[in-house]
Image (cartoon, rainbow, N blue to C red):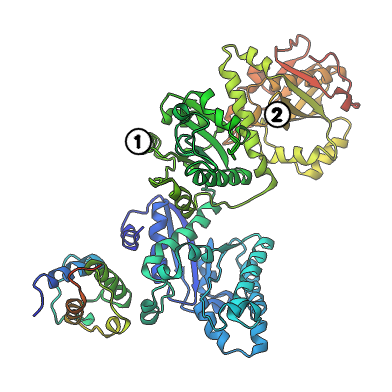
Amino acid sequence: MLHSNLLPAINQIFIDVLDDQDIVVQLETTAQDIDAWDSLNHIQLVVAIEKHFKVKFSTSEIYAWKSVGDMCKTIQERSPVHES
Amino acid sequence: MDFKLLKENLKKDFTGLKKIKLALLADSAEQFLAIALRGYGYSLSYDIEVYAAPFAQIENELFDTESGFYEFKPDFALIWYSPRKLLKQFCALSDSEKSQYAKQKLLLIRKLCQNINQYHPACKIIFTNFPDLGQQIFGNYASKVSISFEYQLRKLNLELMELSQETANFYIHDLCALQARYGEKQLFDARMYVVADMVYGLEAMPLLAKNILDIIAAQLGQFKKCLILDLDNTLWGGIIGDDGIEKIEIGDLGIGKTFTDLQAWAKQLKERGVILAVCSQNAVEIAKIPFLQHPDMLLKLEDIAVFVANWGSKADNIKYIQEILNIGFNSMVFLDDDPYQRNLVKTYLPEVCVPELPKDPADYLPYLTALNLFETASYSEEDKQRNRYYQEESSRTLLKESFTNELDYLQHLEMVAEILPFNEFTLPRIEQLLQRSNQFNLRTIRYSLEELREIAQREEMLTFAFSMKDKFGSYGIVSVAILKPRRKNVLFIDTWLMSCRVLKRGLEDVVLDCMQSVARNKNYDTLMGEYVPTSKNSLVKDHYRKMGFTQHEEGWLLSLKNYQPKAHAIKITGRENYAALEFAACN
């Protein structure tokens, strides 16, 4: 069960990074669904999400993400309640 | 600065900004750097057009004269080989090849530069040097092994510095220095390298962009020339007016070391040619005590070109310093520990650079050096003299302020002009003056050195050069005049120019006096002048009227019969240098 705030927060990061107010992401959204989600923006999304949730992802995680749902799952697993 | 902020700048309006064409040639992914450069450029009022050469095609782009690089015609080429990529080549080499690696690489770099210089000589080359990777194959022992990557890379770095010293348009982008400051840990993101082939992380991009644009801005003439220093708690710890000389912290007392280090830094800048000024809210005689009496003060009064201490506003005092130095506000840096004063100066003089000094004085210097405030595009012997020249100028201004009558002031300057002939010693400077003088230049004829030699030898031509000095220092040769016969009894002033450094001293009166005196001795009765307007010489459009000439159809004429010399305060020497000309009573 995903935290209810997670998807809206991710959505806002997509809007900021891809600079498009109209973006609406769902758990099943993939890079194919959003034109601007290219490899360059993927890097920026990763950095922005890490900053926002105060987590650090592993290389394999970054590499393996296919959908927004994958991202959310990793964040939920990794995001500590209190980051030192 | 954040990468995201730089990226947002890309949406701003770039119209009217200075256009710069920058070619990026890299062996790793550089799209983010291109964004950061354009975004950071915006904050400096540059419209940077970036041409990113195809990925990892540095040699092809530069050797193929029909490549996109040559078509783009960049103002600057940034070449960036990353050690990570070089290491891959290096590992595949035999030991004997490894031992020659730096040499071979430098040969290649030289050839690349030669090609650029041949096919697009206007391009300035910015070459990124090679930070250590710390492979630790040999550990600390690597220094003893000529085939270690560390040895070859550092050797290459040194050779690159030498190459840049011998090649005028070749500049080093000192990534090693940047990495020494921030560390690989902060700049390198191993995950981004694996996933996206980025040799530095996103967070490093603003730092790289700033460092590269520091070089470019200095090349374009935007650099800091003057460091203005507050005194209490900036240059020493404590308040001289309250604590007294024995209690201010400097040298070994208290946290004095941090202030001593800052002074040492400022002194090195001064020796490099940065002008130092003091701006302090203090009584001037008290403010000067540490400079005169404290044994641990590294900065002395003679290091300070303009010393302002009073109870007035610092914004006004910086304006005063600016007027004396006659440099732009945007070339000044103001250091003050007091946030109130900083804010005041920022508000009234927004062009002045005012670093937000950290609270703890121990952090001053690390903070300031990280800003790289004093990037420069040149360094010469003249730079060392600059402080002295401005100090002289400052002394003149101070003296002038104590006089109400202009002529009284000029008399106190104890000015001496020397008349000099055109000869092999004076001609190089005379030629330089002819090339450079724009404002006080009546006809703006740019004779070459050869032409001047010829003129000097022709008997009918009368040539004058004037050097000047006063009680504060020497200006060298500052005025030149060349006269030739026009018709019977009329001598035409072919060239008359003067350096603006000696405006309003009365030197032009001396020059005219000498002209008429020589002319009369040669039996001329009239001097003829002409003003040829240019975009820069409106200063002298009424020159001949002011000098007593009258306008006629053929030009400005001065009859020598009723010539009345004007009052001036300059002593004249050097008539004996001028054997070819006989002077009548001159002055």
Residue B115: quadrant of the picture: bottom right
> What is the number of the mark on residue B340?
1
Quadrant in the picture for the N terminus of chain A: bottom left
Question: What residue is rendered at 67% in x and 83% in y?
Answer: B99
SS of the residue under disc 1: helix
> What is the number of the mark on residue B473?
2
- B580 up-or-down from A24: above or below: above
Whether residue B439 is visible to the viewer of this picture, yes or no, is: no
Quadrant in the picture for the C terminus of chain A: bottom left
Residue B72 image offset from top left, x and y in percent: 50, 67
- The amino acid type of the residue labelled 2 equals Gly
Looking at the picture, tell me which residue is in the foreground, B552 or B219.
Answer: B219
User: What is the C-alpha distance between the residues marked 1 and 2?
Assistant: 38 Å
Crowding around mark 2 (Cα neighbors within 10 Å: few <14, some 14 to 19, many 20+) is some
Specify the subunit that label 2 lies on: B
Question: What residue is rendered at 48% in x and 57% in y?
Answer: B213
Residue B29: quadrant of the picture: bottom left
Residue B112 image offset from top left, x and y in percent: 62, 73
Residue B53 image offset from top left, x and y in percent: 48, 73
> What is the number of the mark on residue B130?
none
- The amino acid type of the residue labelled 1 equals Tyr
Looking at the picture, tell me which residue is in the foreground, B89 or B415.
Answer: B89
Whether residue B308 is visible to the viewer of this picture, yes or no, is: yes
